[in-house]
Image (spheres, rainbow, N blue to C red):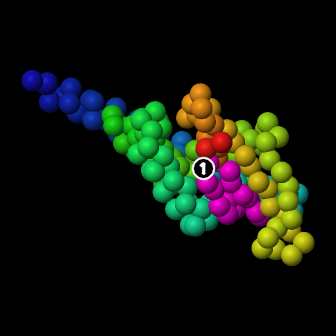
Amino acid sequence: MQNIDEVYYDFTKDTSELCEVRSRAGELERSIENKKIILKSIEGDGSHGVEISAHAFRQISDRLEALGNENEVILKDLVNPENLSASKLMPSNLRSFVFTLIASAKKKGSFSKEPSKNTNGGFEWRYNIEIKGWSNERNTLRFTCIVENNNVKTGYFTWD
């Protein structure tokens, strides 16, 4: 059994660490919000996915769940049984997953600029991303999403 003073020392150490983590999280949240402002500014072209519509979020999460049920490799990537809060299907993780895919496609030039179907004179960006780790020798899994005004409007997965 631990000495009560050791328990108290561990308590204070953990409390201090938690305070530092919360402080860092606050700094990251402010940094993210500042970057969103820059990306949404007049200088931005609207091609950066910084928000996800409720429709797209539901569409993507439902399809990921179905893909996980169809394929064990995908399921293991989506759900982390040792740490469920790290699972890609958790809302904050899903947003990060989608934004990371978009950023990767943007960097590789795997997108096209097209006239908007919703905004007269506006544009939308169609990102086509191959998910190599989830593809197999017969089929390639692609994630396609459409961004307009920095908002992910829709997203879907297809097998080629």
Left or right of 73, for residue 150: right
Estimate how packed mark 1 is, as few (under 14), some (14 to 19) or many (20 or more) residues with alpha carbons within 10 Å: some
Q: Residue furthest front?
A: 138
In the rendered image, the quadrant that contains the C terminus is top right
Look at the image and say whether residue 151 sits in the magenta stretch. Answer: yes
The vertical placement of 54 against 99, above or below, is: below
The vertical placement of 52 against 159, above or below, is: below
The vertical placement of 62 against 93, above or below, is: below
Q: Secondary structure at mark 1?
A: strand
For residue 160, say whether it is visible.
Answer: yes
* Residue at (68, 54) in percent of width and height: 145
Q: Position of residue 21 (x, y in %)?
A: 47, 40
Task: Name the amino acid, label 1.
Answer: Phe
For residue 18, say whether it is visible.
Answer: no
* Residue at (86, 75) in percent of width and height: 120
Number of residue marks:
1
* Residue at (63, 56) in percent of width and height: 155
Q: Position of residue 115 (x, y in %)?
A: 86, 65
Residue span colored magenta? 144-158
In the rendered image, the quadrant that contains the N terminus is top left
Q: Quadrant of residue 104?
A: top right
Q: Position of residue 129 (x, y in %)?
A: 69, 42
Report which residue position mark 1 lands on: 157
